[in-house]
Image: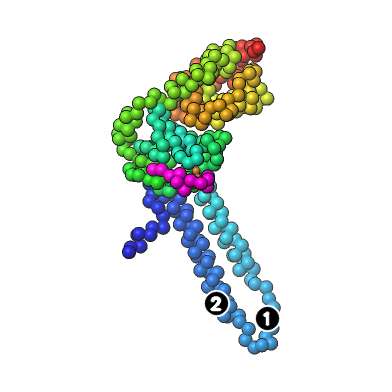
Amino acid sequence: MMLSDFPLFPERASTIAGDVDALYLFLVLVSAFMSVLIFTLIIFLGAKYRRRPDNEIPEEGEPSALLEITWIVAPFFVFMLIFVWGARLYFKEARVPDDALDIYITAKQWMWKAQHPSGQREINTLHVPVNQPIRLTMASEDVIHSFFVPAFRVKADLLPNRYRTTWFQATKVGRYHWFCAEYCGTNHSGMIGWVEVMEPSEYQKWLAGGTESSLASQGEILFQKYACNTCHTNDATARGPVLAGLFGSQQMMSDGTVVKADENYIRESILNSQAKVVKGFQPIMPLFQGQINEEDLLKLVAYVKSLTPPAARGPGAVKPLESPQSFGSSTSASPAQPATTAGTNERKTP
Ligand code: CUA
């Protein structure tokens, strides 16, 4: 039996795996060093300062100042190193690259569902291309679950009431175990799957094998089914705010706060339109809480995201406010568009 049969770390198959392992190895080494030091000192000092004559009296005296300073300052720097190192890694994991491919995950007791932007759906399997950053937008239908792929060193909780995003970039073609890492009921241990990392050409072939229409167009069908299009007509004088160009923009609310229109904002606005009312509009939209499941919500969000005006697109462009074509920002705080803002204020809804 070889030592390599008992690896310290699972296989490394993502860009971040090496960094996580390095930090972890450092923690293990510091802990091991301190454990050995402490036990050695206990035994050594215990022997050295044992009581010899029965009536021996301990020596008076303070430990040297240098010794005291050392044992205060040295751990301080070691802990600061761990903090800075860990924080840098945390931010690296939290910041999703701009060119990431979007995949949506919903979890429920006790299965995983993945939806690709092209409309492809799968259960307990996730197909992804190698060497491509993947952004996962995730929500739970019921209790808290946790997405965990040890080979990628990625773990993120899925919450029942909001989206959580995480990302990874697989570096090796292969098949990797996918676990639920949050106890979620009877079959928690069975809530497992596989991530299939494929060559990009294979992934394209796999995508082409699907019969579903794109996620955004499935969302468009729902948009009509729930009659969203009767108020959100993409006309600045409509009863609902214009949605084209909304995603990623800053929106001014009726209470004066400015909110970034991200996935969570759109999700919340669909379920509970009263939570954040866009300035210049009345809270007349019906509440869809409990009427639309997470999978359909993701489709609607994908549809709203797809409504970005072409001119505002670009790497990381979150600037529809400045764009002349940004008819989506009628309620924005931007003074560049007095005409549309005035139009919004005049509008009174029944
Ligand atoms: Cu889902 Cu544990």
The answer to whether residue 169 is visible is no
The answer to whether residue 106 is visible is yes
Q: Position of residue 261 (x, y in %)?
A: 55, 27
Residue 184 within the magenta-colored segment of the rendering: yes
- Image point (38%, 51%), residue name: 11
The correct choice, above or below, for 259 with respect to 166 in the image is above
- Label 2 or label 1, whichever comes before in sequence order: 2
Q: Nearer the viewer, residue 125 or 136?
A: 125
Mark 2 belongs to which amino acid?
Phe
Q: Position of residue 235 (x, y in %)?
A: 54, 12
- Image point (41%, 43%), residue name: 193
Q: CA distance from mark 2 to mark 1?
A: 18 Å
Q: How many marks?
A: 2
User: Would you name the residue on which mark 1 appears?
Assistant: 58
User: Would you name the residue on which mark 2 appears?
Assistant: 44
Q: Which residues are magenta?
A: 183-194
Q: How is the protein colored in the picture?
A: rainbow
The correct choice, above or below, for 350 with respect to 291 in the image is above
Q: Nearer the viewer, residue 85 or 329?
A: 329
Q: Position of residue 130 (x, y in %)?
A: 35, 39
Q: Along the horizontal axis of the image, is 220 left or right of 265?
A: left
- Image point (54%, 14%), residue name: 230
Local SS, label 2: helix
- The answer to whether the beta carbon of the residue marked 1 is less than 8 Å from any atom of ligand 1 is no
Local SS, label 1: loop
